[in-house]
């Protein structure tokens, strides 16, 4: 009895192989695309670079707690201190400097430097220099005008006193006490390589800032950031 001929055998197998090859290519392409997305996410989470952590308006009773956290994470920061607060508790400034942190000038009593005379400007800066120098042996080279209140006159007067102005690029407004989580999210959501982060260790209740600091430091370190200080 003659065998029945199977119609289209070779063509059928060819079509199947072609379809399988197309499916394999599509699967590989999808995998590559997925890996690319994962790589992009990982890259964003592990961005490397240097950031500058700074504290204003101290020293105060919150300063030792902040110093303890910085020491725990092996981080140094820059403290822009008010002369009147240094004079009230000079031991705190000695402690900041002894721990390897930078102590810089934030004026004597936190005025808007755009609206003071040249004489008052000089007194605000030089008096603060004097009390910081008495505790550290170092004369600050950086000046941070309160309120970020600067204009051409402020820059010119600062330069005449041998100061460089250093402001900030990331401000979570921790001074307003928006909540620990808000402080953390505002810092971590805006920071990038080269950022200068503004926080406060004085000028009011800074318990939220203290509470937010460990997560800020640990997250930034996990992302690959290093911390540096400003000496101008």
Image: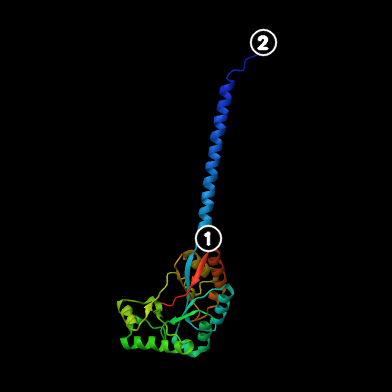
State the scheme by which the image is colored: rainbow
The residue beneath circle 2 is 2
* Direction from residue 24 to residue 149 in the image, left or right: left
* Direction from residue 139 to residue 90 in the image, left or right: right
Tell me where residue 22 appears, x and y as whole percent: 53, 34
The residue beneath circle 1 is 46
Tell me where residue 32 appears, x and y as whole percent: 53, 45
Q: Is mark 1 on a helix, strand or loop?
A: loop
**Measuring 52% from the left and 53% from the top, which residue is drawn there?**
39
**Measuring 48% from the left and 88% from the top, which residue is drawn there?**
135
Tell me where residue 146 appears, x and y as whole percent: 40, 79
Q: Residue furthest top?
A: 1
Residue 26 makes an appearance in the image? yes
Disc number for residue 55 = none
Q: Is mark 2 on a helix, strand or loop?
A: loop
**Measuring 55% from the left and 78% from the top, which residue is drawn there?**
66
Residue 89 makes an appearance in the image? no
Front-most of 139 and 127? 139
Front-most of 112 and 131? 131
Q: Quadrant of the N terminus?
A: top right
Q: Quadrant of the C terminus?
A: bottom left
Tell me where residue 55 appears, x and y as whole percent: 48, 77
* Direction from residue 63 to residue 153 in the image, left or right: left
Front-most of 91 and 133? 133
């Amino acid at each position: 009895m003659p065998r029945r001929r199977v119609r289209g055998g070779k063509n059928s197998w060819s079509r199947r192989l072609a379809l399988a090859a197309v499916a394999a290519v599509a699967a590989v392409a999808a995998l590559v695309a997925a890996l690319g997305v994962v790589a992009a996410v990982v890259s964003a989470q592990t961005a490397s670079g240097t950031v500058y952590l700074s504290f204003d308006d101290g020293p105060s009773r919150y300063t030792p707690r902040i110093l303890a956290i910085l020491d725990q994470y092996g981080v140094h920061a820059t403290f822009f201190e008010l002369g009147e607060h240094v004079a009230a508790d000079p031991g705190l400034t000695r402690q900041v400097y002894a721990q390897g942190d930078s102590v810089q000038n934030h004026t004597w009593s936190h005025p808007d430097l755009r609206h003071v005379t040249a004489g008052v400007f000089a007194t605000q800066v030089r008096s603060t220099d004097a009390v910081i120098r008495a505790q550290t042996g170092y004369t600050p080279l950086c000046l941070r005008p309160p309120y970020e209140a600067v204009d051409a006159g402020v820059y010119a007067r600062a330069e005449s006193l041998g100061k460089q102005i250093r402001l900030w690029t990331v401000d979570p407004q921790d001074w307003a006490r928006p909540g620990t989580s808000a402080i953390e999210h505002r810092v971590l959501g805006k920071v990038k390589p080269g950022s200068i982060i503004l926080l406060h260790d004085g000028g009011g209740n800074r318990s939220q800032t203290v509470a937010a600091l460990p997560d800020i430091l640990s997250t930034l370190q996990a992302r690959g950031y290093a911390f540096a200080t400003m000496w101008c």
